[in-house]
Amino acid sequence: MAEAKIFAGPRVRRLRNRLGITQTAMAEGLGISPSYLNLIERNQRPLTVQLILKMASAYKIDVEELQGESGSVAGELRQAFSDPLLSGEIPAGEELAEVAELAPNAAQGMVKLYRAYREQAARLSDLAGLLAQAGHDPALSGTRLPMDEVRDALEGRPNHYPAIDEAAEAFHARIGAGEDLAGTLREWLKSEHGIIVRTLPVHAMPNLRRRYDRHSMRLFLSERLYP
DNA sequence: CCCGAGCTCAGTCGATGAGG
DNA sequence: CCTCATCGACTGAGCTCGGG
């Protein structure tokens, strides 16, 4: 029976990165040429037994570590991708194994995200069940987020103006505000209008929530406006 | 059994590209 | 300009197989 070849390029590369050495340095340590090590790292050449033994002794690692096993992560990824949410986007088993092998940390991250998503979906489902029992709208289900409920409630009020809402959303998209909306708005006011925004403590501006000084082009905001 | 042609594969060399 | 990574071409050793 022919011996199975070991293509462990990504593991070799991770080991090298962990050691903080270059291909040249590692190749020198292993007594091979840098280009050959490069071929190994890109899975263009298999790891020979001699090289595995050399690596194990030179870098004090376990031989098992080089042979490695990323099957469990690939299995969990497969489970995540079999979720109806991702129907039609199911990668082949080989592709999932490749992701788990080439980017184990990213794969773990995806698995964690999926677990968190499942947990939240289960909680939401429990909540919907409780609400239904209490006689509330059963439409609150796994496909409907609490944010949608809030949006519906706001849009149903008489002081809701869709044009303002749409303009605000368009503006939000235009300035590309991410997590830090307040920071982005400050930057935008400064760059577009030369207005500097300052936040003042409540005792400094007890009767006002905001004040604009036209002369100094400064907008003072009360601390109470912030959550 | 021996020998040589052909093949495979580990490994090298040198050029090149990318990035700091 | 230097370092590092990548690529294609090449070498040489070992193996296979068919013919004599």
Image (spheres, coloured by chain):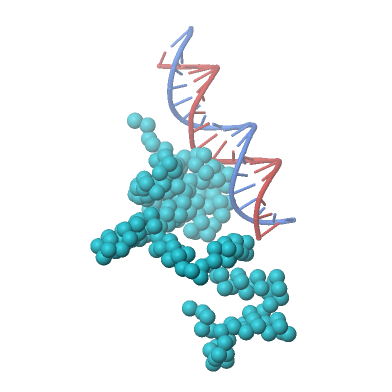
Chain colours: A cyan, B red, C blue
The answer to whether residue A199 is above or below residue A100 is below
Q: Residue furthest front?
A: A158
Across the whole image, how many numbered discs are drawn on residues?
0
Residue A67 visible in the snapshot: no
Q: Residue at x 50, y 54 (%)?
A: A16
Q: Is residue A3 above or below residue B4?
A: below
The residue closer to the viewer here, A97 or A46, is A97
Q: Which residue occupies 40% across, 44% down?
A: A87
- Which image quadrant: the N terminus of chain A? top left
Percent across and percent down for residue A159 are 51, 70
Which one is nearer the viewer's eye here, A175 or A114?
A175
Tell me, yes or no, if residue A111 can be seen here. yes
- Image quadrant assignment for residue A32: top right
Residue A205 at x, y percent in the picture: 57, 90
Q: Quick one: A131 or A88, which is closer to the camera?
A: A131
Question: Farthest residue in the left direction?
Answer: A133
Q: What residue lies at 56% left-to-right and 70% top-to-bottom?
A: A181
On screen, residue A201 versus residue A54, left or right, reads: right
Q: Residue at x 60, y 70 (%)?
A: A184
Quadrant position of residue A148? bottom left
- Residue A162 quadrant: bottom right
What percent of the width, then of the height, locates residue A212?
65, 83
Q: Is residue A12 above or below residue B20?
A: above
